[in-house]
Image (cartoon, helix red, strand yellow):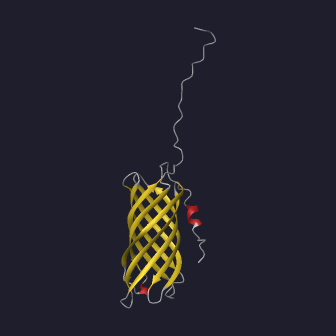
Amino acid sequence: MSPRLPTLALAVLLLANSADAQERRRVEIGGLGRYTFFDDSWLYENAFGGGGRLGVHLIPWLLVEADATLTSTVGWADDQVRHIPIHVYLVYNRPVGRPFDLRVGAGYVHNEYDQRLSGADNGLAGLLAVQVWLFDLIALRVDGTADFMPAPANRTETNWHFGLQAGLSFGIGHVAGPPSQKPPVVTGSPAPSSPHGS
């Protein structure tokens, strides 16, 4: 699948809801735990895994984000298998009142499967996340993800994998929001003098 994903339409639709004038971190890095709900056709046991993420703000309310995780689970023949999903998202960030951010993303997923017959596939990815800033540079984040593979590696018709993720994010640097609008200062002007004097 071409990496030119049909996600620009989502970004354009969200332009109208620009974020307020809060500061946002220019770069965010973090670790996360993930619980994966595998498509039934794989006959994999749903399982926990872990990994990391990196996000870069293009502007205060839009960032590019990537994550990768590793999950070990049990396959259809009771053998240990590994699943490695790699996501790249375009993410809309909307502050909803300090200290909460709401994030919606769409993008690309690449899956690696390590089993008796190793394989890989690609698909479309969606993300919905809530981020809570605990301190100035540290945030707690909870995500829900959905991955759709139209031509899966196990050669079934289509695949869906779902995930729940949680972890900490660390901000590095700042990107400032638009300048705040201050009311103009009105100063009094001297009253005009009477043409007849006093």
Q: In the rendered view, does 89 fall on the left or right side of 137?
A: right
Position in image of residue 154 (x %, y %): 49, 87
Q: In the rendered view, does 49 fall on the left or right side of 187?
A: left
- State the residue lying farthest toward the top: 198
- State the residue lying farthest toward the bottom: 77
What residue sits 52% from the left and 36% below the top?
183
Viewport quadrant of the C terminus: top right
Position in image of residue 165 (x %, y %): 39, 69
Position in image of residue 8 (x %, y %): 59, 66
Position in image of residue 145 (x %, y %): 44, 71
Residue closest to the eye, 36 or 32:
32
What residue sits 47% from the left and 54% below the top?
25
Residue closest to the eye, 177 or 115:
115
Viewport quadrant of the N terminus: bottom right
What residue sits 46% from the left and 79% below the top?
160
Q: How many marks?
A: 0
